[in-house]
Image (spheres, rainbow, N blue to C red):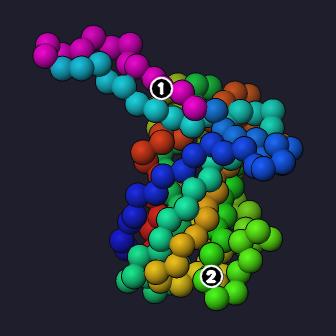
Amino acid sequence: MPKLAIALEPILDGTGTINTPAGYEVVVSTGSQTSGTPKLTYDRYVFGQSADTFVVGHFRVPDDYASGGVIGFEVGSDVTSGNFRMIAGVEPFDVSSTDTDAAVYNAADASSATSVPGTAGQVKNLEITLTMTGVAAGEVVSVFLGRDPDHADDTAAGDVWVLCDSIYFEYA
């Protein structure tokens, strides 16, 4: 199945009361660099345990899109025990009928309870199947990714983070 890299950002909603943006940080490796190479550096979105936090973005659905939809990403944590639960959703901006000022996401599709990697700083791949109602090839869609820390399945007592450049949309 084809994969399309997508960029998401921590964006506060217009009212400032509903969407809490995920944190953002740049991490520089503590390892000794090889001679002549830069320090390994990467950026990540940080999803805390005390409030629902999100990143959002938009992309054009590929012209060869036929069906389905999955958002995937590399996720890790600095804690070594517990489970976390991520959520995601999509909303098409249909040029003929959707009033984007009143649009809402199709659903809050959820991952199952996922265990944090057993070693702090390690990552694992996670995918969430999206409700793709009304999505068509060539359309622009809005997508979000977040953590649902108040769900009973989310027991990780610390932050969960997603590598920024690892987020993708997979489709049939």
Task: Give x and y (percent) for residue 29.
Answer: 38, 19
Please tell me whether mark 1 or mark 2 is closer to you in this view: 2
Highlighted magenta segment, given as a residue range? 24-36
Q: Nearer the viewer, residue 63 or 13?
A: 13
Residue 34 in the magenta stretch? The answer is yes
Identify the residue shown where x is 61% and y is 62%: 143
Q: Is residue 68 toward the left or the right of residue 22 in the image?
A: left
Q: Callout 2 environment at 10 Å: few (<14), some (14 to 19), or many (20+)?
A: some
Decide if residue 113 is in sight here: yes
Q: Callout 1 environment at 10 Å: few (<14), some (14 to 19), or many (20+)?
A: few
Disc 2 is placed on an element classified as: loop
Q: Is residue 47 toward the left or the right of residue 32 in the image?
A: right
Task: Give x and y (percent) for residue 40.
Answer: 32, 24
Q: Quick check: 14 above or below 29?
A: below
Residue contact between numbered discs 1 and 2, judged by CB atoms under 8 Å = no
Identify the residue shown where x is 41% and y is 58%: 5
Disc 1 is placed on an element classified as: strand
Which residue is label 1 attached to? 26
Which residue is label 2 attached to? 94
Decide if residue 148 is in sight here: no
Q: Which amino acid, mark 1?
A: Val
Q: Quadrant of the N terminus?
A: bottom left
Q: Which amino acid, mark 2?
A: Asp
Task: Give x and y (percent) for residue 133.
Answer: 66, 82
Q: CA distance from mark 1 to mark 2?
A: 36 Å
Q: Quick check: 20 above or below 100?
A: above
Q: Quadrant of the C terminus?
A: bottom left
Q: Is residue 36 toward the left or the right of residue 30 in the image?
A: left
Q: Nearer the viewer, residue 120 or 66?
A: 66
